[in-house]
């Protein structure tokens, strides 16, 4: 790819994952057209503008997912589009307006613009492992989930009792019940990915989808994103914890996987991005070793019980693409270090 061909767009560029993606793209010599909701908000843009190469090759554009057609002029002339923008919220007073519409209609809005631009060789979209796992098949320890699995949005909505659905729901600020219906949120993930594949097929867009698990690792941005906020409250011992699992992956691996998904000619389909499926007692044990939270031990009664095996998620396809996963406990340590450096943890 010559220099003139190295122009790409990143939607939702100020986000946790996207900020790392922009950093890596700039390091690799790309010109990045970065969309943000408010280019004048330094909390959302300062960390991007201070990246190496930003002065020369980073351009910020204002874009809102539900603003029909607003991505058209931004993606025009790009060779690649990384669509990461989506609301990541565990609570909403109006989930349809705040989460579902921006995710599904917003994705189609971006893809419609991409379909009009012949220079775009590939669109890489950030989906979620939530659009892989939930379809009614048992998730027992002998199971290895892979990219052939698709969540069934109807199943997600109908099976509110499924314990793994309830993990985040139960963890979300248990003192202050302000979460949304988690099955609803999972169905949003599945529906968004389904809609993207349908549109891409009908409009001959070369789409590659990434399905990360729970993303941890150092933050580039100054404000907490939703999932880092949850790690912070876990570290502070502020959550009541269910016995369940976290499917961890490092933010730097997720960002690099986006680049490989764009650059590797044979990249295709979907890629599960999970280092390991870790049970809560093991997570707490590790966090406790890294950060001496008073009372953390008492929060989880199962800490000393042996950890039972859980289902696995294959990362073979992602490794074939070139991703080598950072071990989740290393990522956890670096997340906590980063939260300390940014002043969110005091010692
Ligand atoms: P994040 O830090 O909250 O970033 C989300 C980005 O989307 C933000 O830049 C946000 O803009 C933008 N956005 C939200 N609503 C928008 C709207 N209506 N119009 C335009 N932009 C909008 O979240 P993240 O963790 O990096 O997540 C990025 C992507 O990865 C999302 O698609 C998410 O579903 C997916 N994902 C994340 C995880 C995880 O554990 N973090 C796991 C699996 C998948 P503002 O900065 O203006 O708010």
Image (cartoon, helix red, strand yellow):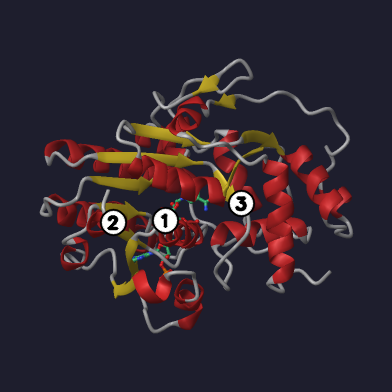
Q: In the drawing, does residue 337 fall left or right of residue 302?
A: left
Reading the chain from its start, which is encountered first: label 3 or label 1? 1
The Cα–Cα distance between marks 3 and 2, rounded to whole angstroms, is 29 Å
In the picture as drawn, the residue positioned furthest to the front comes out as 2
Q: Residue at x 68, y 35 (%)?
A: 278
Question: Label 3's element?
Answer: strand
Q: Which residue is mark 3?
A: 216
Which circle marks residue 28 in the picture? 1
Count neighbours of disc 1 (C-alpha within 10 A) and say few if under 14, some if 14 to 19, many if 20 or more.
Answer: few
Q: In the drawing, does residue 52 fall left or right of residue 171?
A: left
Asked whether disc 3 touches disc 2, contact meaning CB atoms under 8 Å apart, the reply is: no
Q: Residue at x 55, y 64 (%)?
A: 225
User: Which quadrant contains ligand 1?
Assistant: bottom left
Count neighbours of disc 3 (C-alpha within 10 A) and say few if under 14, some if 14 to 19, many if 20 or more.
Answer: many
Q: Residue at x 12, y 54 (%)?
A: 117
Place of residue 161 in the rendered image (x, y in percent of width and height, measured from the top left): 55, 35
The Cα–Cα distance between marks 3 and 1, rounded to whole angstroms, is 23 Å
Reading the chain from its start, which is encountered first: label 3 or label 2? 2
Count neighbours of disc 2 (C-alpha within 10 A) and say few if under 14, some if 14 to 19, many if 20 or more.
Answer: some
Give the quadrant of the C terminus. bottom right
Q: Which residue is mark 2?
A: 6
Q: Is mark 3 within 8 Å of ligand 1?
A: yes
Q: Residue at x 33, y 74 (%)?
A: 60
Tag count in the figure?
3
Q: Is residue 27 above or below residue 143?
A: below
Asked whether disc 3 touches disc 1, contact meaning CB atoms under 8 Å apart, the reply is: no
């Amino acid at each position: 790819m010559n220099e003139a061909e190295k122009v790409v767009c990143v939607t939702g560029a100020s986000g946790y994952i996207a900020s790392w993606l922009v950093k890596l793209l700039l390091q690799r010599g790309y010109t990045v057209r970065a969309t943000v909701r408010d280019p004048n908000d330094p909390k959302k843009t300062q960390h991007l503008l201070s990246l190496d190469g930003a002065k020369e090759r980073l351009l910020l554009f204002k874009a809102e997912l539900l603003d029909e057609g607003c991505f058209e002029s931004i993606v025009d002339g790009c060779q690649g589009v990384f669509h990461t923008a989506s609301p990541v919220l565990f609570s909403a007073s109006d989930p349809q307006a705040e989460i579902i519409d921006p995710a599904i209609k917003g994705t189609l809005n971006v893809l419609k613009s991409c379909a009009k631009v012949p220079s775009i060789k590939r669109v890489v979209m950030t989906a979620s492992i939530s659009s892989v796992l939930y379809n009614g098949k048992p998730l027992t320890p002998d199971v290895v989930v892979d990219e052939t699995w698709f969540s069934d949005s109807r199943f997600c909505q109908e099976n509110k009792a499924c314990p793994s659905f309830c993990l985040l729901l139960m963890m979300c600020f248990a003192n202050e019940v302000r979460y949304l219906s988690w099955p609803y949120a999972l169905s949003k993930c599945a529906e968004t990915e389904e809609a993207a594949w349908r549109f891409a097929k009908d409009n001959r867009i070369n789409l590659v989808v990434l399905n990360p698990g729970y993303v941890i690792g150092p933050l580039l941005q100054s404000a907490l994103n939703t999932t880092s906020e949850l790690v912070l409250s876990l570290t502070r011992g502020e959550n009541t914890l269910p016995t369940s699992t976290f499917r961890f992956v490092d933010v730097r691996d997720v960002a690099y996987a986006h680049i490989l998904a764009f650059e590797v000619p044979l990249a295709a389909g979907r890629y599960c991005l999970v280092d390991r499926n870790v049970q809560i007692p093991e997570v707490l044990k590790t966090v406790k070793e890294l950060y001496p939270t008073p009372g953390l031990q008492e929060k989880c009664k199962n800490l000393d019980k042996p950890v039972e095996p859980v289902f696995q998620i294959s990362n073979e396809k992602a490794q074939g693409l070139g991703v080598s996963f950072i071990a989740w406990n290393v990522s956890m340590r670096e997340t906590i270090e980063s939260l300390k450096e940014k002043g969110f943890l005091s010692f």
